[in-house]
Amino acid sequence: MPFGQALFDQPSLTFSLAMATGVVAQGLARHARVPGVVVLLAVGVLLGPDLADVIRPHTLGSALSSVVGFAVAVILFEGGLNLEVRKLRWQARPIRRLVTLGAVITACGGTLASRAILEWDWRLCALFGTLVIVTGPTVITPLVRRIRLKQPIATILEAEGVFIDAIGATIAVVALQVAIAPSGEALGAAALGIATRLGAGALVGVAGGLLLALLLRRPNVVPSGLENILALSMAMMLYELSNGLVPESGITAAIAAGMVLGNGRSHALQEIAAFKEQLTVLLIATLFVLLAADTRIADVAALGLDGVLTVLMLMLVVRPVTVFLCTSGTNLRLRDKLFLSWLAPRGIVAAAVSSLFALELTHAGIPGGVELKALVFLVIAMTVTLQGLSGGLVAHLLGVRRAENSGYILLGANPLARHLAQQLAASGEEVVLVDANADECRAAEAAGLLVLCGNALESETLARVRPDSRVACIGLTSNEQINLAFARRVIEEFRGPETYVAIEADLVGVTIDAVLAQRARVLFGGVRGLQDWFARWRRDGVQTLWCRRDAVTGDAVASTTPRADVLPLLLRRGDRLELVDSATRVQGGDLVEFAIDLDHRKQALAWLESEGWTRDETDAEPVALAALKG
């Protein structure tokens, strides 16, 4: 046996090559700004047995299905982890219809399309119809984030991708059992089998998710540093346990466990989500390369034009019919429905289950398993490539992308940050607060603000709040080093938004010059006693008031050595609200919001009056500053 052939016949080398080349392919895709799955499929085919023949999935044997199973468990656990129940409620109706009625319509449509065009046996057509029900978070979530869709559509697509994997895969497996052993009894048990699998998976997943959430909520129960691997091991265990109790129920269990944990309260939740996200990227890269390499080019080519027409029928007829029927009577606009009709790429679950089907049909002596697997691969390749590459353009033409340069990101959910967020939100801006402190996050949520609990210095966390589409990113914690590091991270990784850094007066680590050298702005116009202001706000020791100057000289709103009892916050110029920084100059008609320390109220108001500031007449409090001194 030649040395090269023996070398590449090693299962461990096949797996490691798929992993390494998959990660490299993901990196190339990001540099090229194309969907990662497109490059992964190309790499899998290029390095597979039909061309370079260095990645040989057949060497893994039966272990391939186990690898795929574990990877799918982690991927779908991570998908469930990112589904916020609060957001799902807003679009519950279309999501519920798409994963129930939509699954039935897609299965029937796929069956009829393959029967009419390919003229396959009805049994094989029905299996194809059930296989293409799924879309999946492996392809949907990266596309949604890359295209930067508006929230309602993004929520619907991501939720559909996660839930439809469980429902679609379960229906497909039950359909396979009926196809292999067709009988009246099998048909009668099919519906019960679907309900049993989904119900059992949900029970196991919810129970396991609650146990994991309880362990992570209790301080010192799980030693620091073990939270991530505990969550990983639990996800895999719940997947296999559920499958052991009721075959093919593990997918539902993984999703349910992820959702329960993701919507709970845990100090480690954001760290777990970041770890799972990185692991998911690695697993997706590995699986797509392996499964693409496991598909023969000749089998796909043998489908010919009829195979292409079948996929186009699925994309251009079945999906639009599904979407318009499932979203009728909802508040979605026509342009939203059109985009949902276009974007439905198939992912890793469809590929994995089709491989299983091919093996099972072959063992049962039923022809068509190879053709079925090839057609599913063609569906994945065409939908991912066509919809992935065109998704951004279609979203732009339909006007469903998030507006550029809109909204703010605030690092910190402390009382001062919450006040700024409420004022900016009241002016019509979307504001997202990011904080690792769970108590501060809860207080911000109670105030009706959008909050992400996590470490804003991590790229994954930053990507979720989309700095590249924001007006500004604001570092407002009591730690000025973190504020500056946050601004530097945004500037380096996400070009575009303005950055503001709050500097603590009681520290000497960060200077105004250091902030300006990073091309950032100094929030509030100079160094401030941030911790003192946070404490005042917590004990309701602060009053805010809007003021104007009778004589406008173009002076800066605040000097670099301001009073400790007066804090300039915001400037209103016409209909626009701006943050105050060291470069802010007052023009005619401008209003400035000041915060004053109630313990030094008289002195603060006297100083404002001496500087020529008078209370704005539209403010809710008495107009004259002098009247406030009594």
Image: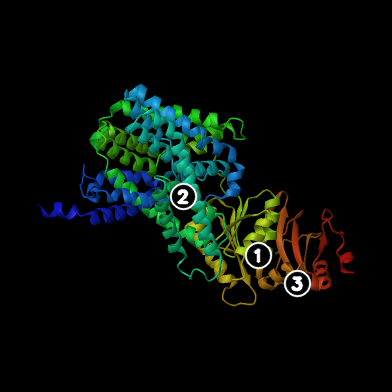
Q: Residue 81: tell me if it is visible.
A: no
Which residue is label 3 attached to? Answer: 565
Disc on res. 414: 1
| Quadrant in the picture for residue 294 | top left
Position of residue 148 measured from the top left corner of the image (x, y, whole percent): 51, 46
What secondary structure is marked by label 1?
Answer: loop
Question: Relative to 385, does residue 272 appear above or below in the rendering?
Answer: below
Task: Judge depth for marks 2 and 3 and give the one in front.
Answer: 2
Question: Relative to 456, does residue 194 appear above or below in the rendering?
Answer: above
Cα–Cα gap, marks 2 and 3:
55 Å
Residue drawn where x is 27% and y is 31% of the image: 368
Position of residue 487 measured from the top left corner of the image (x, y, whole percent): 54, 63
Three-letter amino acid code of the residue under disc 1? Asn
Please report whichever mark, 3 or 1, sits nearer to the chain's N-terminal start.
Answer: 1
What secondary structure is marked by label 3?
Answer: loop
Three-letter amino acid code of the residue under disc 3? Asp
Position of residue 387 measured from the top left corner of the image (x, y, whole percent): 42, 37
Task: Judge depth for marks 3 and 1 and give the one in front.
Answer: 1
